[in-house]
Every structure is written in C-alpha cells, then in structure tokens.
Image: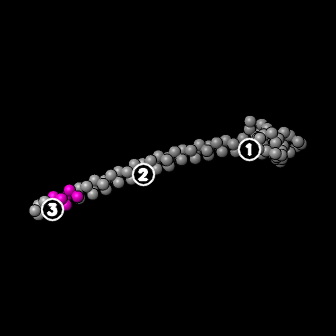
Amino acid sequence: MSVRDSLVKVRDNVWELPSSYKKERRVPGRLYLDDEAKKDMDAAKSKHKDAIKEYNAIDKEINSTEDEINFIEQELVQAEKDLELKEKEMVSEIQLQKV
C-alpha cells in the first residue's frame, strides 16, 4: 500500500501515517499537506521510479563495461605470456646458432 493511500485525515491539511504502515514504525507520523502537495506525492513517486530505472540502466552499462575491461585485461596477460614464451624461444635459437 502506498503512503498516500495509508494517510488518514486528521483535519484540513493535517494527515497521519499510522504506525501500522510499516512494522518498524512505533509511532504515527504527521504530515502537513494541502491538496496540491498530496497530489505532488504521486508525481514525486513517478519521478522516483523513473530515476530508479535510469540508475539501473546506468548500473547495467557500468557492469558491462567492467566485463569488457576484465576481458581485455585477460587478453593482455595472455599476450604478455605469449611474448615471454616467444622471447625464450628466440634466445634458445640464438644460443643454438652460437654452438
């Protein structure tokens, strides 16, 4: 249930959010809202949801980029190993040519 749906009108512009709204709540909360502010709660919730979607998209992109970086790092490590092996082979060939 949303906060807006849980609000109980005490008097004009005074609303109460019961402690039963969430089990962690020990006391009710008082909100001083006019009708305009109460309507704005829905708009704010919508903006919040949009922000979460945008955050998730960015987080997914970051994770994808991190995967690409890890892949490139692995390729570099393998290239270094291959280079070291090639260098050892060349040194061995040079030593054999001297003999």
Dot 1 falls on a residue whose secondary structure is helix
Q: Which residue is mark 1?
A: 40
Q: Main secondary structure of the magenta part?
A: helix
- In the structure shown, which secondary structural element does the residue marked by tag 3 occupy? helix
Name the mark nearer the viewer: 2 or 3: 3
Nearer the observer, 27 or 50: 27
Q: Label 2: how many residues lie within 10 Å, few (<14), some (14-19) or many (20+)? A: few
**Residue 98 sits in which quadrant?**
bottom left
Is residue 34 among the parts visible in the rendering? Answer: no
Looking at numbered disc 3 in the image, what kind of residue is underneath it? Gln
Residue 81 shown left or right of residue 3 in the figure: left
Q: CA distance from mark 1 to mark 3?
A: 82 Å
Residue found 81% across the figure and 45% down from its top: 26
Q: Is residue 93 left or right of residue 28?
A: left
Q: Is residue 90 in the magenta section? A: yes
Amino acid of disc 2: Ile
Q: Residue 44 location in percent, x, y?
A: 70, 45
Dot 1 crowding, Cα within 10 Å, few <14, some 14–19, many 20+: few
Cα distance between the residues tagged 1 and 2: 43 Å
Q: Residue furthest right?
A: 11
Residue 2 percent location from the top left of the image: 74, 38
- Which residues make up the magenta segment? 88-94
